[in-house]
Amino acid sequence: MQEEGLEVQTARNADHYGALVHHLSLIRNKRCLMAYVYNRAEIIRDLAWKVGLLHELPCEIKEKFSDSEEQYFKDHSKSLKMYMSQLSLDVNVDMVPPKDPYIKVRVLEDLGSGIILSDKSANFASHSMHFLKRTDAEQYIARGLMEELIS
C-alpha cells in the first residue's frame, strides 16, 4: 500500500481483511485452548480431593493424563500435603460434621492385613464388614475399595 502511495488508514484491500480475519481466528483459538487447559487443571484439582491426597491415581485415570498433567497432580498434592502438615490439620475431611463419628463399611476388594488405622490394626478381607472411624474409612470409600452400609 505504501508503494502505491495509498494511506493505510483510509484504503483497505483484501490483504488487510485477510490478515485481520487470520489474526482474530488466532486469538479465538488461543482463548479456546486456554479454556480447555484451565478446565483440565480444574478437573485434576477436584480429582485430588476425591481420590485423596495421600494416594496415587488409579491406573484407568492415570493413563488418560499427559505427562504435564500427571506432574501437575503430583505438585498440587505435594503442596496441599505440605500446607496440611504445617497446620497439623487434615483439610481433606468433610466440612459438615457427621452425625456419628463411626460408620459401618463393607470391604469391596481385598486390602490385605496389617493396615494400621488411627486406633487399631485390622485385616480387610474382601466382603468383610467393619465398624470404623469415618475419617479412616473415607479415603478407602473415595477410592472405591469400601462402601458405607446405611442401616
Image: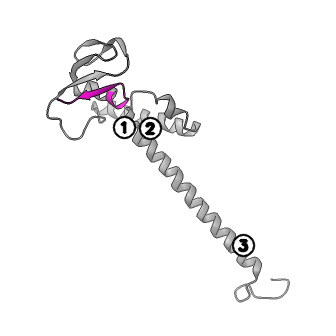
Position of 6 relative to 56 (above/below) = below
Dot 3: few (<14), some (14–19), or many (≥20) neighbours within 10 Å? Answer: few
- Do the numbered discs 1 and 3 sit on residues whose CB atoms are within 8 Å? no
Q: Which mark is residue 76?
A: 2
Is residue 39 found left or right of 143 in the rendered image?
A: right
User: Which amino acid, mark 1?
Assistant: Trp
- Do the numbered discs 3 and 2 sit on residues whose CB atoms are within 8 Å? no
- Do the numbered discs 2 and 1 sit on residues whose CB atoms are within 8 Å? no
Tag nearer the camera, 3 or 2: 3
Q: According to the image, label 3 marks what residue?
A: 19
Tag nearer the camera, 2 or 1: 1
Q: Residue 101 lies in what quarter of the image?
A: top left
The C terminus lies in quadrant: top left
The N terminus lies in quadrant: bottom right
> What residue lies at 59% left-to-right and 64% top-to-bottom?
28
Q: According to the image, label 1 marks what residue?
A: 49
Q: Position of residue 110 (x, y in %)?
A: 37, 16
Disc nearer the start of the sequence (3/2): 3
Is 121 or 9 nearer to us in this picture?
Answer: 121
> What residue lies at 27% left-to-right and 34% top-to-bottom?
93
Q: What is the CA distance from the residue labelled 3 to the residue labelled 2?
A: 41 Å
**Farthest left residue in view:** 99
Q: Secondary structure at mark 1?
A: helix
Q: Position of residue 35 (x, y in %)?
A: 51, 56
Q: What is the CA distance from the residue labelled 2 to the residue labelled 1?
A: 10 Å
User: Which amino acid, mark 2?
Assistant: His
The range drawn in magenta is: 141-151
